[in-house]
Structures are given as structure tokens and as C-alpha cells.
Image (spheres, rainbow, N blue to C red):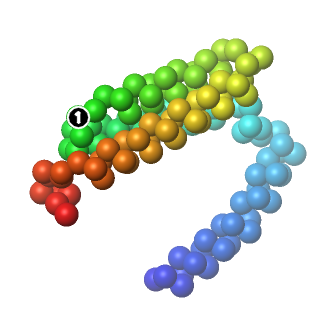
């Protein structure tokens, strides 16, 4: 099973760059595609919210990671409406979202886990 996964990964890694670089030739642009951009923002929001909600409810009860994450998501949305500041807002969003996840991770590991699924 591991070897099959490794081979599939190797094929994926070899073919994906070729496919992605060929998309503009086919008239498909995912870099500044609004559907793709909003989809990625939604995906980041859903995954991040789930992760932070889990940490908050099961481990630490600190709202700080959620607040940091929320500001990061706001910057992600703002970059869509203010293209002149897109890279500034994107940079701030990435730093804040990563900081929120890192802070959540640290709080989770510092807490005394009371969940039966997370006992140390």
C-alpha cells in the first residue's frame, strides 16, 4: 500500500506542474479566477474554523486564536475588493492565519487535556 501511494504521489508530482502550466493555453486561469479565489478563501475559513473550534472547545477556551484568525480572514476578503493592496492584504492574512494556528497549537499542547480522545 505504501509503495502504491509513493508511486501515485510521484506521478502526481510529475504531471501536476505540466497540467497547471498548460491550463492558460486551454483558456483556464486559476491564478486570478474569482471562483477559484473565493473557493480557496471559503476552504481556508472552513478548515481553520473547524481546527480552532476544536482547540477552543476541547483544550484551552482561549478566544485569542479565533480573533487572530478572524482578522486574517478579513484581510483575505479585503484583498478581493482592493486589488491595489492585494499583496499587502494577502501577506497580512497569511501571517495572521498561520499565527492563529500556531498559537492554537501551543495552547492545545500546554493545556491539560480532559477529552477522552486526547488524554496523554
Residue 41 coordinates in the image, percent (x, y): 55, 32
Task: Give the image location of residue 15, x and y in percent.
Answer: 74, 65
- Residue, x 58% and y 36% (percent of image)? 95
- Please say whether residue 96 is visible from this viewpoint: yes
Q: Residue at x 77, y 40 (%)?
A: 28
Q: Considering only vertical position in the picture, is 55 above or below 5?
A: above
Q: Quadrant of residue 58?
A: top left
Q: Within the image, what quadrant is residue 51 found in?
A: top left
Q: Viewed as shown, does residue 35 lie left or right of 111?
A: right
Give whichever of 58, 26 is nearer the camera. Answer: 58
**Residue ID at (60%, 74%):** 8
- Decide: is 64 above or below 110: above
Displayed quadrant of residue 29: top right
Q: Which residue is mark 1?
A: 61
Looking at the image, how many numbered discs can be counted on the residues? 1
In this rendering, would 32 be left or right of 36? right
Where residue 9 appears, x then y in whole percent? 61, 71
The answer to whether residue 44 shows anywhere in this view is no
Single out the residue that lies furthest toward the right.
Answer: 25
| Residue under the point 66% across and 67% down | 12
Near mark 1 (Cα within 10 A), the count class, few <14, some 14-19 or many ≥20, is some
SS at badge 1: loop
The answer to whether 39 is drawn above or below residue 6 in the figure is: above
Residue 102 against residue 100 in the figure, above or below: below
Residue nearest the observer in this picture, 15 or 114: 114
- The quadrant the C terminus occupies is bottom left
Amino acid at each position: 500500500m505504501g509503495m502504491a501511494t509513493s508511486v501515485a504521489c510521484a506521478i502526481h508530482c510529475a504531471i501536476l506542474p505540466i497540467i497547471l502550466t498548460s491550463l492558460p493555453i486551454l483558456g483556464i486561469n486559476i491564478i486570478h479566477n474569482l471562483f477559484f479565489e473565493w473557493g480557496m478563501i471559503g476552504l481556508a475559513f472552513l478548515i481553520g474554523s473547524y481546527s480552532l473550534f476544536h482547540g477552543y472547545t476541547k483544550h484551552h477556551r482561549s478566544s485569542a486564536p479565533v480573533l487572530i484568525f478572524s482578522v486574517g480572514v478579513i484581510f483575505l476578503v479585503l484583498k478581493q475588493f482592493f486589488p491595489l493592496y492585494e499583496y499587502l492584504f494577502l501577506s497580512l492574512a497569511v501571517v495572521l492565519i498561520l499565527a492563529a494556528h500556531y498559537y492554537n497549537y501551543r495552547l492545545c499542547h500546554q493545556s491539560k487535556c480532559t477529552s477522552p480522545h486526547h488524554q496523554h
